[in-house]
């Protein structure tokens, strides 16, 4: 017989929703400055994320510093600092990825101009999707159509 089993843990009346992380499934063809290329770095990011640009980072800032500063946002999915390929030094900017748009918007309002390692950071919505080849072609088609209307 033995002792009775322990009671189940109390249920929260407001359970947090599970956020689903999906990896990029397709190849990302990018276009900028008149060049087109396949961007394999986008394969590491969640497919359904909201990405923010983080600028004015001190050269000494590492990804764990940013993760620590943004830890209160539950849907934080990924942090990436951009480094110079030749020297290995930080370029002074990076990106943070969120799975919830409300968290991303709240983060911009709360964290913009906050100090990380002695420097105020700048946050804004990333424009990485604007370089997708489909978006570039669509925008070019619109621009060409406008030019034709003026002629």
Image (cartoon, rainbow, N blue to C red):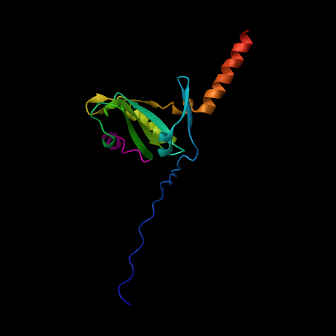
Q: Position of residue 82 (x, y in %)?
A: 38, 34
Q: Residue at x 25, y 30 (%)?
A: 118
Lateral position of residue 77 relative to residue 114, left or right: right
Q: Residue at x 42, y 71 (%)?
A: 8
Lateral position of residue 143 relative to residue 22, left or right: right
- Magenta includes 69? yes
| Quarter where residue 115 is shown | top left
Using the image, determine if residue 21 lies above or below residue 51. below
Q: Position of residue 10 (x, y in %)?
A: 42, 66
User: Between residues 37 and 96, which one lies in front from this camera angle?
Assistant: 37
Q: Position of residue 99 (x, y in %)?
A: 49, 45
Using the image, determine if residue 24 lies above or below residue 90. below
Q: Quadrant of the N terminus?
A: bottom left
Residue 34: tell me if it is visible: yes
| Quarter where residue 87 is shown | top left
Which residue is outermost to the front?
86
User: Between residues 32 and 122, which one lies in front from this camera angle?
Assistant: 32
Which residues are drawn in magenta? 65-74
Q: Residue at x 61, y 30 (%)?
A: 135
| Quarter where residue 79 is shown | top left
Count of number-bearing discs? 0
Which residue is outermost to the bottom?
1
Residue 99: tell me if it is visible: no
- Magenta includes 16? no
Which residue is outermost to the top?
151
Q: Quadrant of the C terminus?
A: top right
Q: Position of residue 55 (x, y in %)?
A: 38, 29
């Amino acid at each position: 017989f033995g002792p009775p089993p322990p009671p189940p843990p109390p249920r929260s009346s407001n359970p947090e929703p599970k956020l689903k992380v999906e990896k990029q499934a397709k190849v990302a063809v990018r276009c900028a400055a008149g060049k087109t290329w396949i961007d394999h770095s986008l394969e590491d990011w969640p497919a359904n994320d909201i990405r923010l640009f983080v600028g004015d980072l001190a050269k000494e800032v590492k990804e764990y510093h940013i993760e620590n500063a943004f830890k209160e946002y539950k849907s934080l999915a990924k942090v990436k600092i951009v480094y110079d390929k030749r020297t290995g030094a930080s370029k002074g900017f990076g990106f943070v990825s969120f799975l919830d748009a409300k968290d991303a918007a709240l983060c911009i309002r709360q964290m913009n101009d906050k100090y990380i390692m002695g420097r105020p950071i700048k946050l804004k919505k990333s424009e990485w999707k604007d370089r997708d080849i489909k978006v570039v072609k669509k925008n070019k088609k619109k621009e060409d159509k406008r030019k034709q209307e003026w002629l």
